[in-house]
Amino acid sequence: MNPILVIAERRITTPGKLNPATLEAITAAQQLGERLGAPVVAAVLEAEDSGCAAECAARRLDRVLHARHPLLASYSPDVWVQALVQIITPLQPSYVLLPHTYQVRDFAPQLATRMGAGLITDVIGFSHAAGAPRFQRPMFQGKFTADVVFDGPAPHSVTFQIDAFRADA
């Protein structure tokens, strides 16, 4: 099975620390990886080593990819997408999981488009049936929940709502 990739996001207000939503996305990836029998890998993008990669590594991941470049010092969607395409292409993950933050909402559609793959946003859970995950997301401002599956080639991108998974699980 191809790996599941989690894109880590750093805290803006506290350099060197991961956004708590990233830790929740890691938990979701670990649960999905357990059900699919897939390894879980995280990618950390930053200008220089701040300790975020080590924080990810402490989360029982199979691997942490640490991309460092001066252009990653401040957030730019074009730079992030270009860096992530260079990580995703050789890794060939089945799923790319991201925390559903303002930053991710900015670049995730562009990333999915560049990869020629689908994107499901605002996911609050998943189930596994008929060999493929079914992602639950609220519809029509939470009036009901829909099960959504991917149709098309991987990598499938998924953003998880904050508090959908416990970071300490």
Image (cartoon, rainbow, N blue to C red):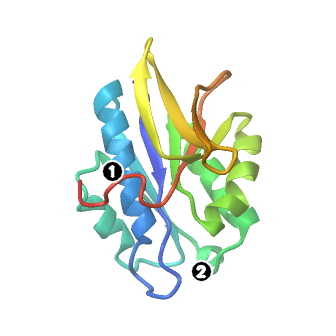
Determine the residue positioned at 54% across, 77% down: 47
> Three-letter amino acid code at disc 1?
Thr
Horizontal and vertical percent position of residue 108: 67, 53
Q: Marks 1 and 2: in contact by CB < 8 Å?
A: no
N-term-proximal mark, 2 vs 1: 1
Vertical relation: 6 (above or below) 105: above
> Three-letter amino acid code at disc 2?
Ala
Determine the residue positioned at 50% across, 88% down: 13
- Number of numbered labels in the structure image: 2
How far is disc 2 from disc 1 in space, using C-alphas? Answer: 26 Å
Mark 1 neighbour class, 10 Å CA radius: few under 14, some 14 to 19, many 20 or more? many
Which of the numbered marks, if any, corresponds to residue 73? 2
In the image, 99: left or right of 164? right
Horizontal and vertical percent position of residue 22: 43, 62
Q: Quadrant of residue 158?
A: top right
Determine the residue positioned at 31% across, 28% down: 35
- What secondary structure is found at the residue carrying circle 2? loop
Residue at the farthest front position: 143
In the image, 143: left or right of 37? right
Mark 2 neighbour class, 10 Å CA radius: few under 14, some 14 to 19, many 20 or more? few
Q: Which residue is mark 1?
A: 27
Horizontal and vertical percent position of residue 160: 51, 51
Of 147 and 133, which appears nearest the observer? 147
In the image, 88: left or right of 38? right
Residue 92 visible: no
Of 120 and 137, which appears nearest the observer? 137
Residue at the farthest top position: 130
If the image is split into quadrants, where does the N terminus sit? Answer: top left
Vertical relation: 40 (above or below) 47: above
